[in-house]
């Protein structure tokens, strides 16, 4: 059995997987692979699957599965798993770091100091304490973010289509009502047909003036042109994102806008999380081998 590691994983993982079979990172051997490990870079499309006739198992190191053609994989009898539990802390901490950084002007304070400027009067700060955080998507990561926000004295409200109770947030029946009350909004939704472009000018119009948006879910859930308009008008005080419609993003005004805080899809890329992902991968592969 050949295991192809198609994207970047913990450097110890190849050796750890050798007990299950041959392990390679040579993409030219895709047609031989029975198991393929991916992250966000590899796109398991219909064409990709057709070029891997021996493929039986795809493991996505991370949460989202929008880079896998799940329908065609199922038709071909290919099992698809992610490692969602592993990434909770890493992504929640990045979302929270972004939420702290924007109202505190941390990036601008650093860049102006390094440029020899003393911008003490220009740099105004806003506290998280007492503010309302609205979480769109109250799954594992949304819940972990809520716990952190509560520790900072924030009021936390959330919307999720099939979550009706939480120990860490007030559940709202509609996204629109949540947006009207939030000072900060954090997106933790998967990319589905129903969520593509779900955050747009109509949703921004419902928000308070000067709201902060954080997106560590999926880039295509947000209409980037509408984000620019909302930033320019002052409807958004800031937009922070780690996720993009494509990796890397195509040319967009977001990358140069003064009110954005940007990251290159590093939400899952902590040292600790890469180790956890490797551990989950081993469990999945072990279960697959034992079930053969």
Image (spheres, rainbow, N blue to C red):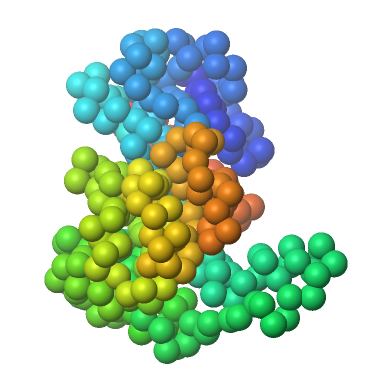
Q: Quadrant of residue 49?
A: top left
- Is 49 in front, or is 117? 117
Q: Is residue 3 above or below residue 198?
A: above
| Residue 262 makes an appearance in the image | yes
Residue 150, percent across and down?
42, 83
Residue 60, percent across and down?
42, 37
Residue 246, percent across and down?
45, 35
* Residue at 24%, 48% in the rendered image: 195
Residue 75, percent across and down?
20, 21
- Is 24 in front, or is 143? 143
- Is 138 in front, or is 226? 226
| Left or right relative to 42: residue 194 | left
The number of callouts visible is 0
Q: Residue furthest front?
A: 233
| Residue 92 makes an appearance in the image | no
Q: Quadrant of residue 97?
A: bottom right
- Is 152 in front, or is 255? 255
* Residue at 74%, 75% in the rendered image: 119
Q: Quadrant of residue 210?
A: bottom left
Q: Residue furthest right?
A: 116
Q: Quadrant of the C terminus?
A: top left
| Left or right relative to 190: residue 275 | right
Q: Is residue 145 above or below residue 29?
A: below
| Left or right relative to 285: residue 273 | right
* Residue at 46%, 47% in the rendered image: 243
* Residue at 46%, 69% in the rendered image: 237
């Amino acid at each position: 059995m050949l295991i192809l590691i198609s994207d970047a994983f913990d450097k110890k993982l190849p050796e750890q997987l050798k007990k299950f079979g041959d392990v390679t990172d040579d993409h030219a051997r895709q047609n031989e692979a029975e198991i393929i490990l991916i992250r966000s870079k590899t796109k398991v499309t219909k064409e990709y699957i057709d070029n891997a006739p021996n493929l039986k198992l795809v493991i996505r190191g991370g949460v989202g599965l929008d880079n896998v053609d799940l329908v065609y994989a199922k038709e071909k009898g290919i099992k698809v798993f992610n490692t969602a539990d592993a990434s909770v802390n890493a992504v929640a901490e990045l979302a929270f770091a972004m939420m702290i950084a924007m109202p505190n002007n941390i990036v601008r304070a650093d860049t102006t100091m390094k440029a020899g400027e003393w911008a003490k009067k220009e740099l105004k700060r806003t506290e998280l304490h007492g503010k309302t955080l609205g979480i769109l998507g109250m799954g594992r990561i949304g819940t972990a973010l809520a716990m952190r926000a509560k520790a900072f004295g924030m009021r936390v409200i959330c919307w999720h289509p099939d979550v009706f109770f939480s120990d860490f947030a007030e559940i709202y029946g509609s996204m629109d009502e949540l947006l009207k009350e939030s000072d900060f909004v954090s997106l933790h939704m998967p990319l589905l047909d129903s969520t593509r472009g779900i955050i747009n000018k109509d949703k921004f119009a419902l928000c308070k003036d000067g709201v902060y948006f954080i997106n560590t879910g999926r880039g295509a859930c947000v209409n980037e042109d509408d984000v620019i308009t909302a930033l320019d008008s002052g409807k958004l005080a800031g937009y922070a994102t780690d996720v993009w419609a494509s990796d890397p993003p195509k040319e967009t005004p977001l990358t140069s806008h003064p009110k954005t805080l940007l990251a290159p899809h590093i939400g899952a890329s902590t040292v600790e999380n890469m180790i956890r992902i490797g551990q989950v991968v081993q469990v999945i592969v072990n279960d697959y081998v034992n079930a053969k």
